[in-house]
Amino acid sequence: MTHVRSYAETRSCNNCGTPYQRRRDAAKKSRGLFCSIKCSNAGRFAPLTADTAVLKSLYCEQDMTLKEIGTKFGVNWKRVQRRLAAAGIEFRNGRRRNPARRSMARYRRVAEAMKGQVVHHLNCSETDDRPENLVAVSRQRHSQLHKQLEQISAKLFMAGLISFDPQNGYQITPKLSELM
């Protein structure tokens, strides 16, 4: 039995503006932006007509990504990168990272280079990357540790040390506050 292709919405080609129906599987992956291979190649291999000063302004001052700039001028991001590299621009490191998130260097110091090892935060705060708060464990052990935490919190709730309020969520009771 053959599979019938399913199509998403009708859209206009990014290169020539011709309306076409994009395949649903391509739409899920943000692909299928051109009506044909010819238009796709024209977009990737077309000459970059923008001035280097404009590209530099968009990248450095307006903080646009190479992909966003390429889309704006209808070319592949690599063409923009080559033009900016020729102009001596230093590139940002790939993704825009949230500085509050963990650093891979710190994880590499904690976790061994074994496949399947993950880093567990002892206080359950993913933003607390102090070495004394991190431990390297297998994925199975990591799951067990989180299940233990859930069991402990359930026991605290059953003992009346933690209460639940529909508006505020879980709260520490005065009884537990005295013990702390």
Image: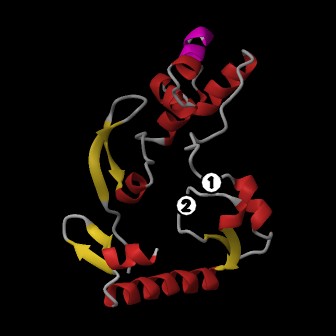
Other residues around mark 2 within 10 Å, as few (<14) / some (14–19) / many (≥20): some
Which type of secondary structure does the marked residue at label 2 adopt? loop
Image point (46%, 86%), residue name: 152
- Tell me which secondary structure the magenta stretch mostly adopts: helix
Image point (44%, 78%), residue name: 179
Reading the image, the residue beneath label 1 is: 102
Reading the image, the residue beneath label 2 is: 126
Residue 173 visible to the viewer: no
Image point (75%, 53%), residue name: 105
Residue stretch rendered in magenta on the structure: 52-57
Q: In the image, residue 23 lies at what x, y percent?
A: 37, 55
Considering only vertical position in the picture, is 22 above or below 146? above
Q: In the image, residue 161 lies at what x, y percent?
A: 35, 82
Considering only vertical position in the picture, is 161 above or below 21? below
Residue nearest the viewer, comparing 93 with 47 = 93
Label 2–label 1 contact, CB within 8 A: yes
Q: In the image, residue 124 lies at what x, y percent?
A: 53, 68
Q: Amino acid at mark 1?
A: Arg
